[in-house]
Image (cartoon, rainbow, N blue to C red):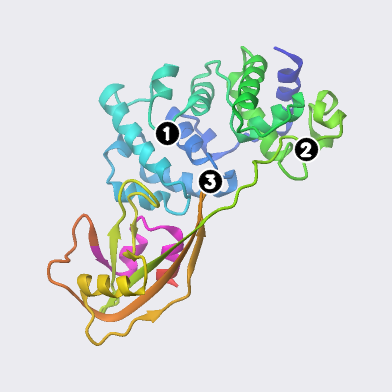
Amino acid sequence: MDTFARSLLRWYDRNGRHDLPWQQPRTPYRVWISEVMLQQTQVATVIPYFERFVTVLRDLPALAAADEDRVMVLWAGLGYYRRARHLQAAAKLCVARHGGDLPRNFDALAALPGIGRSTAGAILALAFGQRHAILDGNVKRVLARFHGIRGWVGERTVEYALWDHAEAHTPATRIADYTQAIMDLGATVCTRNKPRCAKCPQVRACRAYREGRIGEIPAPRPARTLPDRRTMFVLLRDRRGRVLLQRRPPQGVWPGLWSLPEASDADTAHELASRLAEVDGSIAVALPDVRHTFTHFRLHASPLEWRGVRARQGIADDSRSRWCSRQAIAALGVPAPVKRMLTA
């Protein structure tokens, strides 16, 4: 065990996080769910979602057998919804090919939907004690600073160098503790902004600290301008207060969730409203815009609302369209910004 791992483990024994929900108990299923939820999402945000998810879907076979809407309802609000779809797809593959359990073989595990090299390593290290390195966002930052690696961690050459260091530092013993420790160090001490260097067990050997370049390493993602995407929401509300929702396609924005019909402009919105419902005598009212930032673009949605409409014959509740009460909306997988607008 090298000095990096030894000092990190001493720090973890005194200062690490030992009572996270997925550690009590630390089963392969709970570790897997937590690792996927923690991709792009902070621990404090994940905890209530994780607890609710594993209370309803207690094990891998339950996730595999669950209705898709139920999975999406439990996930709604966490964002990056493909993670939820990949979770269930992976669970079904595990039932079909691996006896209802996560495989303990690295290649088989990494091949499952939504599980790459780092997530597979984390699952095998934390749940099974196997020696595998990890390289999530927190670990990249710790290693980049410790070794003084310049550049953005998303660059291929930088990432390859970080993987080499991650492999070299991972010890042969106390694998689960080391894996949790290096994630904890990045999350609580070696943070992106205002790192607590005085509390870091690696400060004396940290190259970025010695050279006064903590603020420069790792380099930020190269600046890019997010394009704006505009759409119109068609909000049809019948005399009982129900709203017409449609399931979004499995690809694209908010895949598989229930949302409002969309149109490109006001004229098209009026035509779509007339096709979906009997809107005679109902005047469209413009509601405040809904704005939401995705990874690759900013969405500006302008809702037009028709009240007191009648359901058009042929537009019935099915797998693609549904008239929903407020209670039904709460029980469906609806994108968070849309749900906020509908329940305001």
Q: Is residue 204 magenta?
A: no
The amino acid type found where label 2 is placed reads Glu
Question: Quick check: 240 above or below 197?
Answer: below
Foreground disc of the pair 2, 1:
2
Residue sitting nearer the eye, 144 or 252: 252
Q: Which residue is mark 1?
A: 114
Query: Left of 247 or right of it: where is 7?
Result: right
- Which range of residues does the magenta coloring cover? 322-340
Q: Which residue is mark 2?
A: 216
Residue sitting nearer the eye, 228 or 289: 228
- Looking at the rendered image, the quarter that the C terminus falls into is bottom left
Contact? badges 2 and 1 (CB < 8 Å): no
Residue sitting nearer the eye, 221 or 330: 221
Task: Give the CA distance from mark 1 to mark 3.
Answer: 20 Å
Q: Which residue is mark 3?
A: 47
Question: Quick check: 139 above or below 311?
Answer: above
Dot 2: element: loop
Task: Give the CA distance from mark 2 to mark 1.
Answer: 31 Å
Residue sitting nearer the eye, 298 or 86: 298
What residue is shown at x 37% (from left), y 70% (from top)?
A: 265
Dot 3: element: helix
Instruction: Pick whichever of labels 2 and 1 is earlier in the sequence.
Output: 1
Q: Residues within 10 Å of mark 1 (few under 14, many from 20)?
A: some
